[in-house]
């Protein structure tokens, strides 16, 4: 278990165990790889981030992950695996999020990318992501760092 503060100084707990905080988390985040590049989305307010979002009523977290990747990037997942779960003690309440690692088989242009401007492919995530204002706060804490280390990337 790792504990650290996020960009807004909220306390975060991250674990690579199997669903340590909730069997039914309400949020998902998906680290996406497409042909050896990182597939992110450009959120209209937050900036560049891996796709993700909220699990809808009646939906499984895995189905939400598949849906969010399609909605925010147009990516069809060919393989996906659970990686970690994290807990954020937010000012307006707690958030529990599953992290997945996915391979994208196909990228198809969408009419809408919802609250994002759609897909962005990157050869690498810059070293200065924590201070780079192009990137979302979601990319700016130990979750990304530990997950990349765990993936051996
Ligand atoms: P909507 O998506 O418009 O409903 O906004 P919301 O603010 O209700 O979103 P959400 O429930 O996703 O997040 C609530 C708060 O939890 C955010 O303002 C953040 O402080 C925190 N939060 C959500 N997701 C993350 C995350 O991935 N990392 C970190 N560090 N904090 C998060």
Image (cartoon, helix red, strand yellow):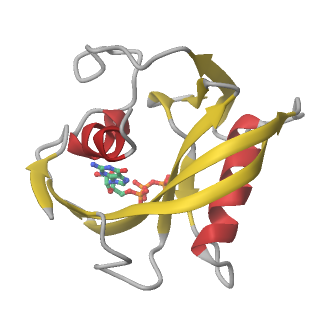
Q: Position of residue 10 (x, y in %)?
A: 14, 52
Q: Residue at x 62, y 24 (%)?
A: 36
Q: Position of residue 142 (x, y in %)?
A: 21, 42
Q: Position of residue 52 (x, y in %)?
A: 55, 50
In-front residue for pair 60/117: 60
Q: Residue at x 56, y 61 (%)?
A: 81
In-front residue for pair 53/126: 126
In the rendered view, does 138 fall on the left or right side of 9? right
Q: Quadrant of the C terminus?
A: top left
How many discs mark residues in the rendered view? 0
Q: Quadrant of ligand 1?
A: bottom left
In the rendered view, does 50 fall on the left or right side of 142? right
Q: Residue at x 29, y 79 (%)?
A: 21
Residue at the limit of the structure toward the front, as seen here: 152
Q: Quadrant of the N terminus?
A: bottom left
Q: Position of residue 31 (x, y in %)?
A: 51, 43
> Does 76 sit above or below residue 24?
above
Q: Quadrant of residue 40?
A: top right
> Does 3 sit above or below residue 141?
below
In the rendered view, does 75 fall on the left or right side of 61? right
Q: Quadrant of residue 89?
A: bottom left
Q: Residue at x 64, y 39 (%)?
A: 115
In-front residue for pair 10/81: 81
> Does 101 sit above or below residue 89?
above
């Amino acid at each position: 278990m790792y504990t650290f503060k996020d960009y807004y100084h909220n306390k975060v707990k991250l674990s690579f165990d199997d669903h340590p905080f909730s069997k039914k988390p309400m949020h998902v985040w998906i680290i996406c790889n497409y042909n050896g590049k990182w597939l992110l989305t450009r959120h209209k307010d937050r900036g560049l981030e891996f796709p993700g979002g909220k699990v809808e009523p009646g939906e499984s977290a895995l189905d939400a992950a598949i849906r969010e990747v399609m909605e925010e990037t147009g990516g069809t997942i060919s393989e996906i695996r659970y990686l970690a779960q994290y807990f954020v003690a937010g000012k307006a309440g707690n958030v529990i999020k599953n992290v997945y690692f996915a391979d994208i088989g196909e990228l198809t242009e969408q009419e809408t990318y919802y609250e994002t401007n759609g897909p962005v492919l990157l050869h690498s995530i810059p070293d200065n992501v924590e201070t780079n204002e192009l990137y979302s706060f979601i990319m700016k804490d130990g979750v990304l760092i530990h997950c990349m280390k765990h993936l051996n990337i």
